[in-house]
Amino acid sequence: MKSENEKTAAVFKAFCDENRLQILHMLKSGEKCACKLLQELNVTQPTLSHHMKILCDSGVVDWRKEGKWTYYKISKQGKEHALSLLKSILEE
């Protein structure tokens, strides 16, 4: 079982890469298919899978399968959790 610090670190790890930040920016406008993310990012499928695993493991991004494709979106609960973590760390 992960400690609270490990869970917090996983959330912040999601924001520590340019590609993941670009993915989050793309997902702000709504759910996207992995195929669309691949086209926009110009990365390989294994690289996208790596980034999406980190984002999903953090709880910031949700996913669902439809046929052979996976669709991703920003998790409302994950977004609120990430904001509260940042606030709790930086506020006195």
Image (tube, grey):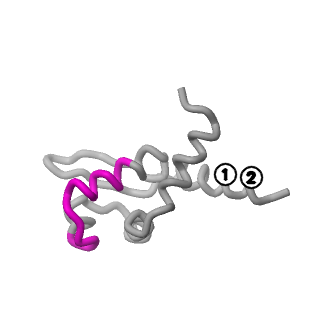
Residue 69, x across and y down, in percent: 18, 52
Q: Quadrant of the C terminus?
A: bottom right
Q: Residue furthest right?
A: 92
In the image, residue 1 above or below residue 62:
above
Mark 2: which secondary structure? helix
Query: In screen coordinates, is 5 left or right of 18?
Result: right
Which amino acid lies under the numbered mark 1 shown in the image of this protein? Leu
Residue 51, x across and y down, in percent: 35, 55
Q: Residue at x 72, y 57 (%)?
A: 87
- Residue 57: within the magenta? no
Q: Quadrant of residue 21?
A: bottom left
Residue 64, x across and y down, in percent: 30, 46
Check contact, mark 2 vs mark 1: CB within 8 A.
Answer: yes
Residue 60, x across and y down, in percent: 48, 52
Query: In screen coordinates, is 67 left or right of 78?
Result: left
* Circle count: 2
In the image, residue 41 above or below residue 1:
below
Which amino acid lies under the numbered mark 2 shown in the image of this protein? Ser
In the image, residue 79 above or below residue 10:
below
Residue carrying label 1: 85
Q: Nearer the viewer, residue 30 or 52?
A: 52
Mark 1: which secondary structure? helix
Q: Residue furthest top?
A: 1
Magenta span: 39-53
Q: Nearer the viewer, residue 5 or 31?
A: 5
Residue carrying label 2: 88
Main SS of the magenta segment?
A: helix
Q: Quadrant of residue 89?
A: bottom right
* Mark 2 and mark 1: Cα distance apart in space: 5 Å
